[in-house]
Amino acid sequence: MAIDKQESVLFDETDRENEEEKVTFADRPNRNQYLPQSIESSSGSFTSDVQFSSDPNKIKSIKLVDKSRRAFSLSIESSKAFELAIRKPRNKCKHSVTTIRSDIYGVFLLLLKHHGNPPGMKDLNWVFTLYSAVLALDLMMLINFTMHIFTPAENYDKFGWAFLFVFFGVPYLAPFFAIIAAITGDSTLMKTMGNLNSIAIIFNIPLTMLLSIINGDDAVYLLLLTLMICSKIALSALGAKVRMYLINPRYSKNKVKLLKILSRQNHKLRLREQILGKEAVQQIEGVG
């Protein structure tokens, strides 16, 4: 009902500015301490030049505007205005276009932007070993399918051209960049490899599979292309791990140290609560 009436569901009629003035915050000066007494706040819009400063010896002239429209304001009026703004119906044509654009961009981010997650373990040998194994497997399948494209030669006219030229040479450039990145330890090349794998998975390989089905190619090679997609997904995931390690190689060691410090602090807090009691700890911390 409150939404239909354009009323706030977070605040009621008891939430007013004079109630807000009674709330105090730790380590925060009273916002009206240095305001001139001649200025009276109201719920209506007003604009006025006043003297405001947290330091009485340093007075600066600023302009006050309507609280409901002031950015980063903590007042009740601005919170109500923000709540109503985000609940505003958005069912027009321009909103539908914005939704479609956001969906397309979201898919683009998921498929082509590999942000990665740094490995959180000390021993990374298994990550490097898996990266090498998956890369070798991907190369073997690529060589096998390339031989199938040119043997017999008419396979190139049926579906081979799609694998090679929809995005020119992408299935071959991706493992090439993966090898060079592994040799040089270049995180930029590792990211480029992930992007090329994504392009091959989205465009080159599916179109090749479609043409292979239309032209009645052997189902074994369709399975090979499916396994190639899986290997490229695994290679991109492992490559993202390795890339984040190359960017921040001390992440895992620092994470272990911080977890030990946090564990010791939590142990001390539990001991203090056992000795003093929960209520005493809350009174000391000013909670409750």
Image: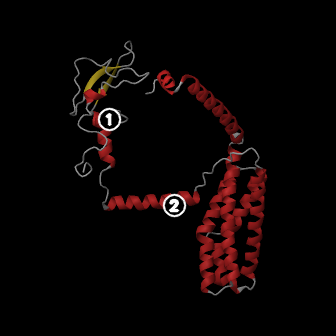
Identify the residue under disc 2. 107
The first of marks 2 and 1 along the sequence is: 1
Task: Identify residue type, mark 1.
Answer: Arg
Q: Can residue 152 be seen in this view?
A: yes
Q: Residue at x 23, y 26 (%)?
A: 41
Could you say where residue 234 lies in the image, as x and y percent from the top left?
68, 61
Identify the residue under disc 1. 70
From this viewpoint, which residue is outermost toward the top?
57
Task: Identify residue type, mark 2.
Answer: Val
Query: Of 121 and 275, which appears nearest the observer?
Result: 275
Count of number-bearing discs: 2
Could you say where residue 36 lies in the image, as x and y percent from the top left?
27, 17
Q: Which residue is drawn at 65% across and 74% down?
A: 163
Q: What is the quadrant of residue 72 in the picture?
A: top left
Query: Of 259 and 250, which appears nearest the observer?
Result: 259
Could you say where residue 284 lies in the image, as x and y percent from the top left?
49, 21
Q: Is mark 2 on a helix, strand or loop?
A: helix
Q: Which residue is drawn at 66% across and 53% down?
A: 240
Please state if 55 lies on the left or on the right of 228 as rendered.
left
Q: Distance of mark 2 from mark 1, alpha carbons?
A: 35 Å
Q: Is residue 169 visible?
A: no
Query: Of 264 and 135, which appears nearest the observer?
Result: 264
Placement of 2 over or under 39, stated as above or below: below
